[in-house]
Image (cartoon, coloured by chain):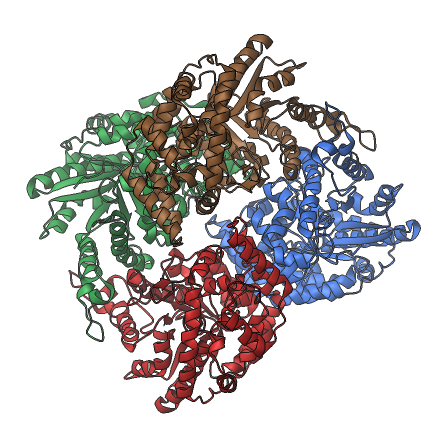
Chain colours: A brown, B blue, C red, D green
Amino acid sequence: MKVPRCMSTQHPDNVNPPFFAEEPELGGEDEIREAYYVFSHLGCDEQMWDCEGKEVDNYVVKKLLTKYQAFFRDHVLGEDLRLTLRVPNPTVERAEAKILLETLESIPRSYDTASLFYGMDAAPVFEVILPMTSSSSCLNRIHSYYLDFVKGKERLQLADGVTVKEWIGEFRPDEINVIPLFEDHEGMLNAAKITGEYLDGKDIQEQRVFLARSDPAMNYGMISATLLNRIALSDFRDLEEESGVKLYPIIGMGSAPFRGNLRPDNVEDVTWEYRGAYTFTVQSSFKYDHEPSDVIRGIKKLRSVKPGRAAEIERESVLEIISAYCREYRRQVMDLVDIINRVARYVPGRRKRKLHIGLFGYSRSMGNVSLPRAITFTAALYSLGVPPELLGFNALSSGDLEFIEEVYPGLGRDLHDAARYANPESPFLSPEVKSSFEEYLEPEYDEGHMKTTEEIIRALRINRTANLQELILEAASQRKFLG
Amino acid sequence: MKVPRCMSTQHPDNVNPPFFAEEPELGGEDEIREAYYVFSHLGCDEQMWDCEGKEVDNYVVKKLLTKYQAFFRDHVLGEDLRLTLRVPNPTVERAEAKILLETLESIPRSYDTASLFYGMDAAPVFEVILPMTSSSSCLNRIHSYYLDFVKGKERLQLADGVTVKEWIGEFRPDEINVIPLFEDHEGMLNAAKITGEYLDGKDIQEQRVFLARSDPAMNYGMISATLLNRIALSDFRDLEEESGVKLYPIIGMGSAPFRGNLRPDNVEDVTWEYRGAYTFTVQSSFKYDHEPSDVIRGIKKLRSVKPGRAAEIERESVLEIISAYCREYRRQVMDLVDIINRVARYVPGRRKRKLHIGLFGYSRSMGNVSLPRAITFTAALYSLGVPPELLGFNALSSGDLEFIEEVYPGLGRDLHDAARYANPESPFLSPEVKSSFEEYLEPEYDEGHMKTTEEIIRALRINRTANLQELILEAASQRKFLG
Amino acid sequence: MKVPRCMSTQHPDNVNPPFFAEEPELGGEDEIREAYYVFSHLGCDEQMWDCEGKEVDNYVVKKLLTKYQAFFRDHVLGEDLRLTLRVPNPTVERAEAKILLETLESIPRSYDTASLFYGMDAAPVFEVILPMTSSSSCLNRIHSYYLDFVKGKERLQLADGVTVKEWIGEFRPDEINVIPLFEDHEGMLNAAKITGEYLDGKDIQEQRVFLARSDPAMNYGMISATLLNRIALSDFRDLEEESGVKLYPIIGMGSAPFRGNLRPDNVEDVTWEYRGAYTFTVQSSFKYDHEPSDVIRGIKKLRSVKPGRAAEIERESVLEIISAYCREYRRQVMDLVDIINRVARYVPGRRKRKLHIGLFGYSRSMGNVSLPRAITFTAALYSLGVPPELLGFNALSSGDLEFIEEVYPGLGRDLHDAARYANPESPFLSPEVKSSFEEYLEPEYDEGHMKTTEEIIRALRINRTANLQELILEAASQRKFLG
Amino acid sequence: MKVPRCMSTQHPDNVNPPFFAEEPELGGEDEIREAYYVFSHLGCDEQMWDCEGKEVDNYVVKKLLTKYQAFFRDHVLGEDLRLTLRVPNPTVERAEAKILLETLESIPRSYDTASLFYGMDAAPVFEVILPMTSSSSCLNRIHSYYLDFVKGKERLQLADGVTVKEWIGEFRPDEINVIPLFEDHEGMLNAAKITGEYLDGKDIQEQRVFLARSDPAMNYGMISATLLNRIALSDFRDLEEESGVKLYPIIGMGSAPFRGNLRPDNVEDVTWEYRGAYTFTVQSSFKYDHEPSDVIRGIKKLRSVKPGRAAEIERESVLEIISAYCREYRRQVMDLVDIINRVARYVPGRRKRKLHIGLFGYSRSMGNVSLPRAITFTAALYSLGVPPELLGFNALSSGDLEFIEEVYPGLGRDLHDAARYANPESPFLSPEVKSSFEEYLEPEYDEGHMKTTEEIIRALRINRTANLQELILEAASQRKFLG
C-alpha cells in the first residue's frame, strides 16, 4: 500500500484566499476545485476532507471524477492519489453523530462511481480519520459498524425473504481503516497504547496514526505541544518493534510558529525536528500565502525527504517541565481572555464551517471560559503584538531551557520566527514575559507589523472598530499567515 | 391526517423559466427556492421532490428551515405543508438503487433538524412515492427496509456490546408510508389489487395512491390514458368500500392537452372530469407560463373544489376501444420516430436532470426504437404542427366516439384545445388523421403558431438549424406550454 | 406622461432577505430579479436603481428585457413600468464622479436595446435622481452634460472629418429629466426655490421632485423630519400655482416609525398624513417582512389612493419648535454615540454596497463624530430598547405637543408604534425621556422584544458577543423591521 | 516600454475547461480568474481581453486589483504585466459600435483605480486592438476619439461655465496606442502600408502590429495563411528599415496544426518558423489540454527564445501558388458545407460569447453560404476524419511543394501532425485528396481517433445523435485540442 507523504488539509490559517475561490470564505464547490488544484498543480498526494454535514461531502469522488476526467484517467484516485475523510466523533459531537453514519454509507457509492469510471474495481476512499480519539472503543465501533452494517447489510433479509444484496446490489469495499487522531494531553500520552488495543485481533500489517500539533499548542502552550508530539512519536517506535505492525504517523502542522512553523522555505529543518513522522500536512497558509513556484518546490521536497527514526526521549523529566510551563501559560491566557474574544470577532473566516467540534473547529474552553478556535486564537494574539509562542516562557529556568534545547533543537528558530512580530510596547505583553524572552532571544522587531499592531490597539481603546478587520488582515499579510 | 389537495411537481413542461432561477435549466438550489415560492406565494400545500442523486436531495428540509425561518415558524412542515420524496425504483433503475437507501437514511436526520427547529417532535417527511409500481413486493421491501434497518438498527449491537442507539441516538419516525405510483397499462389495471395486497396485515386507516396521466398518454395515446385513469379511480372506489381503508388518489396532470390539459383557467372542468381524485398536481407550465395572479387564483380553486366520487365505468367495452385505438396510435408514432428524435434534440431542457428512468424522465422505448421523454416528445410533435392528441383518432368509429363521450365528456374540449395548434399543411400530418379530426372538430387554426411551425419545417428541410431552438420556443410561448 | 404612484427602492431596512436572493446580502443579479418581482408579483409601477459602480448598473435594461421577455412584451418598460436611476452626486461624492458620466453614457445603449426589443422607438430610462440636491447648478450641469455631450457628441468631427454620428450612429433620447432629491435641513426649506430655478428657461410642463423622510430623521429627530417634509410639500403647492408647472412629489418612506412608519396595514393613514405627495416609496421591509398577499394588497391601495392637496402650514412656529427639539435630540444622540457604533458593528447588512455617500448610504457625521447609516443607526438603538423616535421628546412642552398634533395628527400613532419596543429598564434610556413619553403615551411594552433587548444589553456588558447578531435579528423579527 | 513576449488569449479551442471554471462555458468572472492564473501560475506577461458588451469588461482592472491585492502589489499591471483590450470594429460590427466608445470611456476609470492602488500614477491599460483592420482611417478615428473627446472633454464647458475637469476631475492617460489586427487576404498584403499611413505625423518610436493565423486558414487554406503571414512579416521588416520605427509583430496562433500548431512541446520549431514575430499568443488548448508543468515550461521557453529577423520571400511566386491552391481548397469546403454545419451544432462551446463578428467570433461566409467560426469549423472536420489541413493539397504539383518547403520548412511537420487524425475510410475524404497526401506523407493513422470518427459518421448516418457530443469530445481529447 503506497502511503502518502504530503496531506493537504482544509485548515483556514491563510491570509490570501486561493485565486479560484468564489468568495474569501471557501464553500464546498471551492474545496472540490482545491482538491484537484493541490493534486495537479501543487503535487500533494493526499487531500483530507472534513465531513461535517456539507451537502457536497458525500459527493466528492463523483464530482472530482466527472469534472476532471482527463486528469484522473492518468492518476488513479485511491492508488496514486488519496482522499481521506475526517468524520465527526459521535462521543464528542453528539449532534453530528448521524453524519458519521451517512459518511460511512456513502463509501460504497463512491466505490461504484470509481469502478464505473476506471472500468475496474477501484476503492477511492477506504480510510477515515476519527478526531479527538481518547479510547480504542470508538475506533472499534466505527470499524465494526462498517463491517457488520454498511457491508454486512447485504446478507439481511427483507419482508418477502429477498436479501438486500439481491434487491439493491453489492456494497464494497468490504472493510475500511480507521486512523486515530490524538489531540489532547491524555490522547497524546496514550496514543501508542490505544493504537495497540485497536490493532489487537485484527489482521493489519500497516496502520496510519495522526498527531495534532495545532490544538495542543492552544491548550498547553507551544513547547508542551511539541514535546507531547515527540513522546508519542517515540512510543509509536516502541509499539512498532513490539507488535511488528508498520506504523505511519501523520503530523498536523500549520504555518504559524505556534502551530508548527512549517513553510515552503523551511521544510528540511522542520521535518528533521519531527523525524519519525511519515506524512506531513500542508494547511492553507502553506499553499496560498507564498508564490506558487515556491509552494511547488516545498511540496516536492516534503515528498522526497527520507523519513527518519523517532529519537529517544526522557519521558518523566519532559512531563515535569511541561506541567510547570503549562500552568503559567494557561494563567497568562486566562488574563487575556476578554481582549482575545473581543479581537477574535474581527478575524475574518476563510471556510464556510458550521460552529462545531472538529479538529480545527474546536471552540475551546479553558476552565469555564470559552475561547475561539486555535487559528482565530493565534491571529487575535498576533494582532495585539503578543505572539502566543511567548506566553509562559518566563516559567522556564535556564536549566529547563538547556534540557529542552536538546530534545527540541528548533526551539530557538520557532521562538525567533514568532518574537519578530511581538510589539514590546503592547499593553497586553506582560513585563515578565517580555524580559524573559528578550534576554534569551534578543529579537529584532518587524517595524511594519509593530506599527499595524499599534493602530489595532489604539482602535480598540477608542472603540473605532470600523476598519479593524482591514488592520488585522494587513498585519497578517505582513507576517504571511493569519493564525 | 390532513391530506394535501394541490401537489406542486418538478416536471419541466414550461416555456418560461421561473423568475428566481439562476439559468433556464433549474438546479437543486433553484428547486429549494421553488418549494418556498409555491408554498408562500402560489398557495400549494405539497411539493414533490425528485430524489435522483442530486447533492441537495438529502438536505431539502434543512435548507428550507434555515433559509426561510420566519415562514416555516408559522407553517409547520409535515403538518400544514408537505414535502413528499419521489425515490428511484431499484427494480427499474438498477444503477440508482443505492440512492433509494440513502434517501431513506436521510429521513431521520430531517426529523432531528425539524424537531430542533420547532422545539417539539416534528416529522417533516414521512411519505415516499415509488414510481413504476408493478407489484406490492417492492412497496413492502421499502416499508420493511425502513422499519427493520433504518429505524431497526437502533437495536443492533456493535463490537463492544453497545447498541447503535446508545452510541449514535434515536432514529425517527418509526415508520414511513409508501405511495404507489402506477404508470403503465398493467399497473393502471391492477392498481387497486396491488394496493390491497400492500395494505394486507398493516394497521393503515388512510392510504394515498398516485396515477400517472402524462406518460401513459405517450405510450398508449391520450384517450387510452384518460380512460385507464377512470378505470383505476373506479377500482379504488370499490377497494375503499371492501377494505374500509380511506383512499386518497393523486393524479399527475400537465398543462398540454396530451398530458392532462390542467391550466389555471379550466380547473373546475378538469377536476370534475377526474372526480374521485383527491389531490391534483400542478407542473411547471401551470406555475410559470401564466400571470402570477391567475396562477394563485387557480390553485385556490383547486384546493377548495369538493372532491367527487369516481363514476362507474364499463371496464370491458372501454378496454376493447382502447386496444384498437392504441394500436393505430403506436403505428403512427413509429412512422414519425426519426423526425421526432431529430427535433427533440433542439427542445431546450428546463431541469438539470441526469438521463435516468423516472416518472417524467423515462427515455421511452416502443418496440426496439428509443424515444425522448414525454414532455420533449410532446414538444417535438407540436413543433411539427402535429399535436399528438390527434394521432390514432382515425381508428375511432362514430359509435366509439359516442361511447367515449359519455365516459370522457371532456374529449371535445381536450381535442379542441390541441387541434388549434395543428398545421394542416404539415407533411408530417397524415391525410387520414387530418380528415378524421377536421370532420369531428372543425378547428380554427392559430395563425401565429402555424406560421412558426412552417419556419421550423422549412429549417429542417434545408438543414439550416442554427436558430431552430428559438423557433421551437417561439411556438411554445404562442401555445403557453412547452410539451 | 403616466407618473408612477408606487416606487420600489433598494433600502436595506428588512429582517428577512427576499426568498429569491442568493445570500442575505443582495448583489446586482438579485436586484435584477427583485425589479421583475416587484413589477410582476407585487404590482409596483416603478423601481429605483442605485448606480454606484456595480458592474450590472449599466446593463439593467438589457438584462430585464432578455431574461423576462414574455413579461416585458406585455408591459412596456418606460411607459407602463418605470426604471429610474439614482446617480452619484459628484459635488458630494468626489471619488464616484466618473460613475455619473458612465451612467449617463449608458442611457443611449439602453434606448437601442429597448427599441430593438419592442421593434419601435422606446426610451426605457429618461429620468435620473440627484441625491443631496443643495443647488440648481448641479441639476443644470447634469441636464446640459447629457444634452451637449452624451447626445451632442453626434455632431463632433473626428480626424478624417467624419462625424461621430456617421461613424458610430445616433444617441437617443435627446434629453433627460433630472429629479432633485432634497435630504438635509437646507435642502428641504429651499426645495421649491431650487426647483423653480432649475425650471427657469426650460420647456417643462411636468416635473417630479423627491423628499427624503429617512435621513432627515436621523439628523434632526423624527418630528423635525416630518414637519420639514410638510413645509416642503406646501411650498411645492405654491410653486405649482405660480409657475403653472404640474409638480409630482415623491416621498421616501421606510417601515420603522422613525423612518416613515409605512407598512402594508396602515397605507391609508400614512398617505393621508403626507397628502400632497403623489408617489410613495416601498423599501425592503415593506416588501419582505410581511406575508406576500398582504404586501400585494397594500401596494394595490397605495396606487389607488387619491392624491390629496398639501395642507397649509405656519412655517415660522414650526421652525421654532423644531430647533429646540432638534438640539435636545442631537444632545441625546451624542451621549449614546459610542454604544451606537459598537452595536452597529453587529447589525447584519442586507445589500452588497460599497461604503459611499448615497441616499441611504450616508455615513453620517454629527459634529466631528461619525455615525452609521440611518437604517443601521435605527436598528442599533432599537436593539438597546431605546427607539430613536423617543429621543428629544422631553424637550416638548404640552403646548408644543398640542400645536404639533394639529400639523402632524399621526404623531400619537407613530410614537405609540415605536414606544411598544422600548425597554424601560434599559440603562441607555435616560430618565427624562422615559418619564416624558410614559406620561404622554402610557405604552404597553412588547414582552418578547423587551426580553431580547435584555439579553443584548447583558451580552454587551459581559463582552460575550459571539451570538449578538442572532439576538439583534431576533428582536428585529419580533418588530418586523430591521431599522 | 517593455513589450510582452507571450499573450494569453480567450480563444475557446480547448477540450478541457480550466479547472477553476464554474461551468464548461467560461463567463466573465472565470476570465478574471483566468487572467490572474496565466500571470501567477503559467508565467504569461500579457492577457488579451475581448470587450464585447459583457458587464465585467469595463471592470477588469478593478476586479484584478481588489481580488488579488498581494500579487499585483509585487507585479505592476501596465508595466510588468499587460492587459490589452480587443474592441469591436464599428465599421464591421455596426450593432456593437457603442461598446467601442464605452470601452474607451472606461480606460480613465481604470487609470484612477490603479493609481489609487499603487499610490502613484499608473496606466494599467493604454493599448487597444482593432480587429479586421482594412484601412488606417478606422485606426485614426479611435486614436483621435480618445485624444479629443475621452481626454479632450476635460476642457469642455457646461451650462454654468464650469469645465468638466473642474466638475468631475482629470481623465488620464492622455493618449492610447491602437494595434491594427490584420485578418483577411487584403489586410495581410497591405499590413505594412496601412501601418505606415497610421504612423504618419505621429510621434511614435515603437508600434505593435497583430497578424491573425487562425481565421485566414479557414478562408484561404492552411498553406495560404502561413505564407500570407510570412509576406506580411517581411514587409514589416522593410517598413522598420524605411521608417525607423521599431515594429513588434504579434502572431495569433492556436494549437490545431490548421490554426498554428503551437503546443508546449514544439515551441522552438514553431517560433523559428515565424521568425520576425516578437509576441506569440497562447490560446486555451495550449493552456488547458496539457499537464500544468509542461505548459509552464513551454511558456518559459516562449518568453526566452531570441526574436529572429523575418526572412526574405519571393512575393510574386508565393501569391501565384496560393491562388491555385486556395481555389481548390474553397471548392472542397463548399462540397462539405452541409455536413460541416450539421456536425458544428454538436461541437460544445467553451466561452459564453454572443454570436458576433470578432477575431475568433466570425461567423464566416464563403460565397453566399454561412459557415461556423474557425474553431468550430476545424473541430467539425476533424470529427469527420477530414483534417482541414489536407483540403486543397491535391492542387499542389511536386514543383510547388519543393518551392513551398523552402519558404515554409515546417510544412511536413504540420501536415504530419494533422494527417495522423485522418480517417482514410471517411466518406467525406475525397479520393484525390487522400491519394495526394498519402503519397507525400505516408502517415500512420491514430487507431483510437479513427474508431471514434467511425462512430460519429455512423451516428450521423442513422440519425442517432443523442450522444454525438460525447463522441466529438472523445475524439478531441484523443488529439488534445478541440479545433
Q: In the rendered image of this protein, does residue A162 appear above or below residue D129?
A: above
Quadrant for the C terminus of chain B, please.
Answer: bottom right
**Farthest right residue in view:** B242
Decide which of A290, C9 is in the foreground and name it.
A290
- Please state if B274 lies on the left or on the right of D292 as rendered: right
- Image coordinates of residue B195 in percent, x first then y, are 84, 45
Quadrant for the N terminus of chain B, please.
Answer: bottom right
Q: In the rendered image of this protein, does residue C277 appear above or below residue B111?
A: below
> Could you say which quadrant of the image residue B270 lies in?
bottom right
Decide which of D360, C138 is in the foreground and name it.
C138
- Please state if A328 lies on the left or on the right of A181 as rendered: left
Decide which of B106, C182 is in the foreground and name it.
C182
The answer to whether any part of residue B308 appears in the image is yes
Task: Give the residue displayed 38% in from the left and 78% down from the top.
Answer: C188
- Image coordinates of residue A298 in percent, x first then y, are 37, 25
> Could you say which quadrant of the image residue A57 lies in?
top right
**Farthest bottom residue in view:** C242
- Please state if D55 lies on the left or on the right of A189 as rendered: left
Task: Give the residue displayed 26% in from the left and 52% down from the top.
Answer: D116
Task: Give the residue displayed 36% in from the left and 58% down from the top.
Answer: C53
- Image coordinates of residue C90 in percent, x first then y, are 29, 66
Q: In the rendered image of this protein, does residue B294 appear above or below residue D309?
A: below
- Image coordinates of residue A349 in percent, x first then y, are 46, 43
Decide which of D7, D411 is in the foreground and name it.
D7
The answer to whether any part of residue B439 appears in the image is no
- Count every numbered label the image shows and give the total: 0
